[in-house]
Amino acid sequence: MQRDLQQPATERRVFKPFFCYNCQHTVHIQVPETEDSTFEPQCSECSSSFVEEVPISRLESLGGDIHTTTSNNWYGTSGNVQVISLSEDGEPVRFSFQLGGEGTNFAGSSTEEEQVEEQRQENEATLTYNRPFGLADFLQSFFVPRGNMARFQAPPPAPPLPSWTTTQQSDARQMGEEVTGNHESSNQDTFSNQEEDQRRVRRRRIPPFVAAGPFFLDGSGSEVPVDFTTFMQQILGIYGNPADYVIGEQGFEAILSRLMQEDSNRYGNPPASKEFVASLPVVHLSAEEAAHHSECSVCKEAFEENNEVVQLPCKHVFCKDCIYPWLERHNTCPSCRYELPTDDPEYEKRKASQSSASQG
Amino acid sequence: MASVSGLPRRIIKETEKLLQDPVPGISAVPHEDNARYFNVIIQGPDSSPYEGGTFKLELFLPEDYPMAPPKVRFLTKIYHPNIDRLGRICLDILKDKWSPALQIRTVLLSIQALLSAPNPDDPLNNEAADLWKKDEQRAIQTAREYVRLYASQ
């Protein structure tokens, strides 16, 4: 519960997706519902202001062709799948592909014209794949690290690369890197070698939207049956109970937010300054002091005479072995949240501006 | 508890205390196969929309506990602005305001207090938070209905 005390409680606030350039992924930040140019959004995880709103409204404005489905519709899906994602620039990118056919490898069964739409004419780009684009390719584009996916690739022969016809290639190329997967050995590549090299280099970098979503899936259309177990095992390489896994828009988001929450070290204050911690005196408790401080609030053990303890500037005392690991993570006193100096210049700057603001 | 060996003394002490001297309205029992995993039951606090409800939660002490907070989640479905559909809890001490001076007991007390004092201004379940602000009576009714449907024994 990060409460922003400067905001009146009556003001309605909503969560909006932002891309944090510091954390390098999408975070949801609470912002005033009404436009407020004075409001400065800060990353909910690192408190950096270097964030940019992800224009999800651009996706919605594309209108009727967007379908969001539950993960159930994904299971055993077949036919036309439409995917809409955000490019690195936050522009909506749309493509669709055909699922089904070809037995167990789930490669696409037909050539599908791909479209990348942009509202502005000059950015309009149309992609044409001259090979079937398979679900495996699509999934590969989402899994990290990619090396591990090699064994789940669709069987050879590797299909040729798609040829691109674009009027402006920025977003299309971003997307292209994703969807072409590892099939760079193709001889039907329409790019020059130099471009291919650039692409190869850039492909190593994982574009933020891969880890960020949101994407939308819609299985509709023809009735090509897909064996879900085979799909799980051969394409995703996961076995056991499919209910242990989630796929699809909501599942993907849920997993991401779960993963982000799992890492508790991402939260809270920065570590205490190493130099400052080293300068804290380690003392041996006298019998009297041991009785006075009663117990270490970290290990909950009663202090005894001669215990090696560290006293923080707030006068709270802790076992040496208890307080050091904590200060390596966060700069606060476990008992009273007194904040020690840090080695984080950004944090120190914020703290200074806050204290001067509260004085003025 | 078969797996006590290697368990930090603090966890053993906390567990003993929880079993011997439980917090009123809260029970926390370690799993017999994993002393870091607790089955928790919290009774809905009196004069709250959750009164009469019995809520199951799971609590897990990660490897680096108490340097990192316990992971706690509602297993019982609950309608609350700060608890989402997956049972995750929006509570500062479980995130950035964690301190190693806190413990299982204090965490569970805080969760019990959160049931008494929903905070729609810091929502995790946006839908519930919206209703809480627009029509508190109806939100409370919905919360009660959830208790009747999912948290009654």
Image (cartoon, coloured by chain):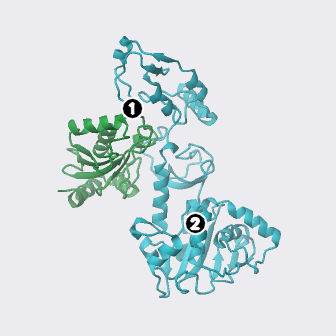
- Residue at image position (22%, 61%) is B149
From the viewer's perspective, tell me whether residue B102 is left or right of residue B22: right
Chain B colour?
green
Q: Is residue B149 left or right of residue A127?
A: left
Chain shown in cyan: A
Q: Give the CA separation, mark 1 to mark 2.
A: 41 Å
Residue type at numbered disc 1: Ala
Residue B146 against residue A293 in the figure, above or below: below
Give amino acid for label 2: Phe
- Total marks shown come to 2
Chain assignment, label 1: B
| Image coordinates for residue B103, horizontal then vertical, percent | 35, 36
Q: Nearer the viewer, residue A80 or A184?
A: A184
Disc 2, SS: loop
* Quarter the C terminus of chain A occupies: top right
Answer few, some or many: residues within 10 Å of disc 1's Cα (few below 14, many 20 plus, some between 14 and 19).
Answer: some
One can see residue B29 in this view: yes
Return the mark for residue B101: 1
- Residue A142: give its label: 2
The 10 Å Cα crowd at callout 2, few under 14, some 14 to 19, many 20 or more, is: some
Image position, residue A102 (x, y; %): 56, 86
Which structural element holds mark 1?
A: loop
For the point 36% across and 11% down, the residue is: A288
Identify the residue at image location x=55%, y=34%.
Answer: A271
A285, B51: nearer the viewer:
A285
Image x and y of residue B91, in percent: 39, 44
Residue A330: give x, y in percent of width and height. 51, 34
Q: Label 2: chain?
A: A
Q: Quadrant of the N terminus of chain A?
A: top left
Judge whether residue A70 can be spotted in this image: no
Circle 1/circle 2 CB separation < 8 Å: no
| Front-lying residue, A341 or A328 | A328
